[in-house]
Amino acid sequence: MPKIRRNPLIEIISINTGCLNECTYCKTKHARGKLGSYPIEDIVERARTAFNENVKELWITSEDTGAYGRDIGKSLPELLDRLIEMIPNDCMMRVGMTNPPYILEHIESMARILSHPRVYSFLHIPVQSGSDQVLADMKREYCIEDFCTIVDFLKQRVNGITIATDIICGFPTETEENFNETVSLVNKYRFPVLFINQFFPRPGTPAAKMKRVPTQEVKRRSRIISQLFNSYHPYNDRIGHKYRVLVTEISTDKQYFVGHNKFYEQILIAKNQCQLGDWIDVEIEAVGKYHMMAKSSWQRYLMNRIRQTLSSMNNMNVNNDNLKKISLSSCVIILVSSILYRIYRKIV
Ligand code: SF4
């Protein structure tokens, strides 16, 4: 199993190599080959070692996590359930990209897993096109109804879930009508995270031999999808919302720390208000297209630091009630000591 830890707080575990599909535009399949799942025990052991080394986030990745285990008689939910058992209270797991076909079989279990407090309610499901005809030409092995079934089910069963997806504009057989179906799909779900790609013929793939949509037209379609994506603002109503956030990264401009809430939404926080690896309570004070910005008052910061310290000292989950009780007890002790000291000074 390859070891990937670019950030000391995040362990990326690739759970299998290759995939079960033969998408006609894909070059990765040629490089990675058939599905090869790593044993559950090896993955769990890797995760355990990572948490012992103070990792805070576990990212489970592969070309298609939904296909995990089909070659070794296991399944993704079996693996995730084992991992959940050993994730410490102050750590989180993020499940990586899954194609629609195989995840559909496990949709009930996935809804349960993505609702777990130590799993981000986030899933990346690349749809690629809103047209059944194009999906068939891409050999994606699902139809739009399958994709919508998954998204609708997860949205209904996993409170606040974030669904990310990918679109390819200008696949060789994509007609104007097919493209409009994609536009409708994006309009229907208004995905907060959308990766828009222009079709590019990868040498040696079946799609590279197909007659191409003119480049100008591919660009026009990609522009239309981009304009649609930029026309909605998923975080506009969040000002004043409060979240508990795990801080694990630094923003690209190096100005902020980046944390994520339960829905893996990106929240920027001033560097003097927390430390990497902290869990903090924040209040949203500004929003952008891709992120929210939060403040953490000095009182909240102090509370967060006390909570972090107590958590690490006692390895226990300190909730707000406990923290208030501890803070109150400390104040009473200080007050009583100070009164006793004054009385003592007067007597002496
Ligand atoms: S696009 Fe993904 S699922 Fe399709 S063949 Fe390539 S790696 Fe496999």
Image (cartoon, rainbow, N blue to C red):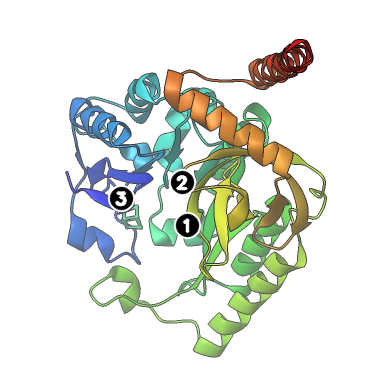
Q: Residue 25 placed where, x, y %?
A: 35, 67
Q: Amino acid at mark 1?
A: Leu
Mark 1 vs 2: CB contact within 8 A? yes
Q: Is residue 184 left or right of residue 59?
A: right
Q: Residue 54 placed where, x, y %?
A: 34, 37
Mark 2 residue crowding within 10 angstroms, few (<14) / some (14–19) / many (20+): some
At x 67%, y 66%, the residue is 180
Circle 1 residue: 135
Which of the two marks, 3 or 1, is nearer to us in this view?
A: 3
Helix or strand or loop: what does disc 2 sit on? loop
Mark 1 residue crowding within 10 angstroms, few (<14) / some (14–19) / many (20+): many
Helix or strand or loop: what does disc 1 sit on? helix
Q: Is residue 218 left or right of residue 320?
A: left
Q: Residue 158 placed where, x, y %?
A: 62, 30
Q: Amino acid at mark 3?
A: Asn
Number of the label disc, if any, that sits on residue 21:
3
Circle 2 residue: 142
Is residue 11 visible in the rendered structure shown here?
yes
Quarter holding residue 281: top right
Separation of marks 1 and 2 at Cα, in angstroms? 7 Å
Separation of marks 3 and 1 at Cα, in angstroms? 13 Å
Q: Looking at this view, is 224 or 335 the one in front? A: 335
Ranked by sequence position, the earlier of labels 3 and 2 is 3
Number of the label disc, if any, that sits on residue 34:
none
At x 55%, y 54%, the residue is 258
* Mark 3 residue CB less than 8 A from any atom of ligand 1: yes
Separation of marks 3 and 2 at Cα, in angstroms? 11 Å
Ranked by sequence position, the earlier of labels 3 and 1 is 3
Q: Amino acid at mark 2?
A: Tyr
At x 50%, y 30%, the residue is 309
* Quadrant including the C terminus: top right
